[in-house]
Amino acid sequence: MITEGLMKQISFIKEIDKLKYIQRRTKLFNSERCENDAEHSWHLAMMAIVLAEHSDKPVNILKVLKMVLIHDLVEIDAGDTFIYDTSKNHTNTDEERIAAIRIFGLLPKKQAEEFIAIWEEFEEGISDDAKFAKAMDRLEPLLQNTSNNGGTWREFNVPYEKVYAKKKAIKEGSSSIWAYAQQLLNESVEKGILKK
């Protein structure tokens, strides 16, 4: 039976295909091609599954997966804000909230409310699940930039202090992954691909 709920879900599924067209500044590992938001979300989901054992606190992996898969859907309308942008803050914006209401609002009411709540929880970054999800979101571009001889750090002349300030969110989700991240940052400074 084809229900109204099913048709709303199909409409949402078609809409989120647009995420594949949202380009990020960060490039793929060892590549000159920029990553798109869908690739980023997929990679974070895989990272969360593989690295879950390193979370400092027990996490609900299904909820973490939902967070990393839906957190950037708002960028279909709001666009991707570069994390080191100097003119626009990379925090939850009015544009993103409007986008969340529109995009998740395509779903049946109960599911829309669940997705908005999960998106908000990720943005707030307070729960253990959100802290681990955010750790994944901060780790992936660090791995990309170190594989690309400094990548966006060099391209946009981003200093160590700014990178460190954004990456320290990893510490909230995993002390062992944070230790590894710090090692990568220090090695990047030593190699001259990140300016201190």
Image: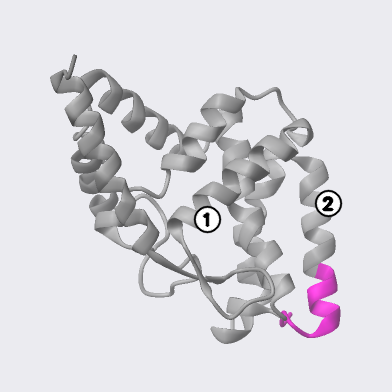
> Dot 1, how many residues are within 10 Å of its Cα: few (below 14), some (14-19), or many (20+)?
many
Any magenta on residue 194?
A: yes
Q: Is residue 164 left or right of residue 127?
A: right
| Displayed quadrant of residue 38 | bottom left
Q: Dot 1: what SS?
A: helix
x, y percentage for residue 81? 39, 65
Which badge, 2 or 1, comes first in the chain's sequence?
1
Residue labelled with disc 1: 40
Q: Is residue 160 above or below residue 113?
A: below
Q: CA distance from mark 2 to mark 1?
A: 23 Å
Q: Is residue 181 left or right of residue 150?
A: right
Residue labelled with disc 2: 179
Q: Is residue 74 above or below residue 59?
A: below
Q: Is residue 183 above or below residue 187?
A: above
User: Hey, what amino acid is under mark 1?
Assistant: His
Q: Which residue lies at the image location 79% right of the left edge and 42% below the top edge? A: 175
Q: State whether residue 23 appears in this view.
A: yes
x, y percentage for residue 177? 78, 47
Q: Which residue lies at the image location 78% right of the left edge and 31% below the top edge? A: 53
Q: Which residue lies at the image location 22% right of the left edge and 24% below the top edge? A: 6
Viewer-proximal residue, 84 or 106? Answer: 106
Q: Quadrant of the N terminus?
A: top left
The stretch in magenta equals 186-196
Q: Quadrant of the C terminus?
A: bottom right
Q: Which residue lies at the image location 67% right of the left edge and 71% below the top edge? A: 145
User: Hey, what amino acid is under mark 2?
Assistant: Ala
> Dot 2, how many residues are within 10 Å of its Cα: few (below 14), some (14-19), or many (20+)?
few
